[in-house]
Image: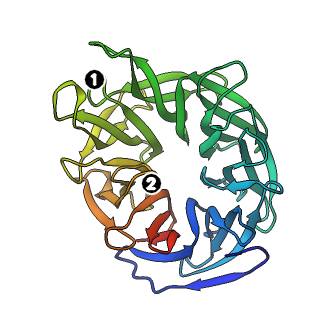
Amino acid sequence: MGFCGIITLFTHTVFAQTWQTVDDLPAAEARGLAVAPNGTLFASGFVAASDGHYHGLVMASTDTGITWSGALDDYVYGPGYETLYDGGMVTNPVGNLYVAGEAYGVEAANHWIIRRSTDNGATWSLVDDFAPGSSETQPFGLATDSAGNVYVAGVANHPGVNDLVWTVRKGVGGASFTTVDTLSSGQANGIYSHPTAGIFAVGSAYIPGTRGYKYTEAWIVRRSLNGGATWSTVDSFQLSQNLNSRAFGVGADTSGNLYVVGQGFVSSGKSGKNAYSHWIVRKSANGGSSWSTVDDFQLSPTGNSGAGRFIADSNGNLYVAGGTPFNQWFANEWIVRKNPGGTGTWQTVDDFQYVSGGAALPFAMAANASGNVFVGGVGSSSSGEHWLVRKK
């Protein structure tokens, strides 16, 4: 299947008050969503192209997902490379678009790549190519601040370090990227620029354990109050002591309250046996100084659940997307939960499988000024993977 040089158009019936699939591309995965200031919805991901390699792909919809056009960007890093836009996308207040991903194949090292468009997706250029020498190097999330700077969160194996490292990079004005935060034995999964409270990066890192556990993985939130110059850990959380917890996504509501979403394991037996993960949402009402758990959910008491992404719509409703669990390597059920007005009770509003018994997993969320919420991800069928965008 090839998308190179082809303009495609997809039309779907949309019902605004229910969740409906509004984009379905075979042999592809959607990993990023962004709504530009002019209302255009962009989706990014990757496609298995006719040349036998993965290409980074960007599509767009000017009518809230009813029809789609593209490929606006069909990118290959170089001959023989697999190129995946799997690190999300973001737009800034003046409409510049950024997409994050990785390229690998010819060399042993992954290339962490950031591409930018300054003309509503018509043309793209490479603004960061970070390859410190690890096959694990990869961005997982990106954000922009009001000054037009770009922050990217991920993981890398830096020279001279024999372990994966939590890594945050900053692009001044959307270019000139440098590494501004590292944390040993950690992985930064998401990042968010709060209008007043600073930059927040979320993920996980190993901490000392107790009762015979040498190390254990904790949910980590780090904050910078000075544009990335210095960072401090403002939340180190485990749902159950000595059992892994991980944060995946971060955002804020219309009142400025912060939300971090992820998963935490709890044991149902002795010595950590039969441990299952819970879908966790944590909130800070004071700019990250203190945190409390506001949603602890399991779809099944003997299954794994995990929250992955957060968005607030223009009406003040909160949405969290995730899976069972939030992990691309296991069978998943695509779940969206909602908190009406941010003050109600969390409830499941979309429980989706692409085909009965088949895996589906959301990786991205966006919302527009009209109250629509979009969730992007992947669904599996007997014919392979499908790039999916669903809309409420």
Where residue 75 sits in the image (x, y, percent)? 76, 61
Colour scheme used in the picture?
Answer: rainbow
Tell me, for residue 375, which label it has, or none.
none
Examine the rendered structure and indicate whether residue 232 appears above or below residue 37. Answer: above
Depth-wise, is mark 2 or mark 1 nearer the camera?
A: 1
Q: Which of the 4 quarters of the picture holds residue 155?
A: top right
Instruction: Please tell me which residue lies in front, 105 or 83.
Output: 105
**Residue at image location 79% in from the left, 76% down from the top:** 5
Q: How many labels does the image show?
A: 2
CA–CA distance between discs 2 and 1? 29 Å
Q: Element under label 2?
A: strand
Q: Which amino acid does label 1 sit on?
A: Gln
User: Where, by quadrant of the figure, is residue 97 drawn?
Assistant: bottom right
Circle 2 residue: 311
Q: Which mark is residue 241?
A: 1
Please report whichever mark, 2 or 1, sits nearer to the chain's N-terminal start. 1
Q: Which corner quadrant holds the C terminus?
A: bottom left
